């Protein structure tokens, strides 16, 4: 299995919690200083973008995990194929690669 990427130094849970707190503060300031409503609205919109970005990071992390698994499975199948071909005892050493490629294609078709 390939090495895992270094873990992020930023916790998305912490970012989400800080965002929630900031939105509460903005709501309080909006009530306390209604003359700055347009300004608070802009800050609040920027904070809302953070939540969208957190969702996108989570989606990309899941896609990255799937790609890493696919890569690891293909690498294992390639090694098995090379080993079988080197030993010469397997009548169809490419079976391992064909099987893995077929499995990934079928999964991708189901996901589409």
Image: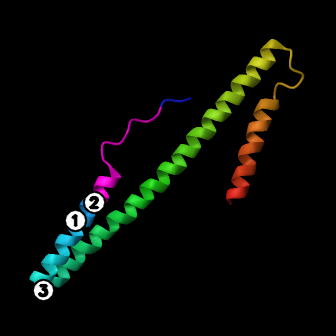
The residue that appears at 28% across and 68% down in the rendered structure is 47
- Say which residue label 2 marks: 17
Classify 2 as above or below 25.
above
- x then y, percent, for residue 76: 67, 28
Magenta-drawn segment: 4-17
- Say which residue label 3 marks: 34
The residue lying furthest to the right in this view is 91
Q: Is residue 93 left or right of residue 82?
A: right
Q: Are marks 3 and 2 in contact (CB under 8 Å)?
A: no
Q: Are marks 1 and 2 in contact (CB under 8 Å)?
A: yes
Secondary structure of the residue carrying numbered label 2:
helix
- Say which residue label 1 marks: 21
Disc number lying in front (3 or 1): 1
Q: Quadrant of residue 42?
A: bottom left
Assess whether residue 102 is covered by the magenta stretch: no
Q: The C terminus appears in which quarter of the rendering?
A: bottom right
Q: Could you give the CA–CA distance between mark 3 and mark 2, rounded to whole angstroms?
A: 25 Å
Q: Earlier in the sequence, mark 3 or mark 2?
A: 2
Q: The N terminus appears in which quarter of the rendering?
A: top right
- Dot 1, how many residues are within 10 Å of its Cα: few (below 14), some (14-19), or many (20+)? few
Q: Is residue 77 left or right of residue 16?
A: right
Q: Earlier in the sequence, mark 3 or mark 1?
A: 1
């Amino acid at each position: 299995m390939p090495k895992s990427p270094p873990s992020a130094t930023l916790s998305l849970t912490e970012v989400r919690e800080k965002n929630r707190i900031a939105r509460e503060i903005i709501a309080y300031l909006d009530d306390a200083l209604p003359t700055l409503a347009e300004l608070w609205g802009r800050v609040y919109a920027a904070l809302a973008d953070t939540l969208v970005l957190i969702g996108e990071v989570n989606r990309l992390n899941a896609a990255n995990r799937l790609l890493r698994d696919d890569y690891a499975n293909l690498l294992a199948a390639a090694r098995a194929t090379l080993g079988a071909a080197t030993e010469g005892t397997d009548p169809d050493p490419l079976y391992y690669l064909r099987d893995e490629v077929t499995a990934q294609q079928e999964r991708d078709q189901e996901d589409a």
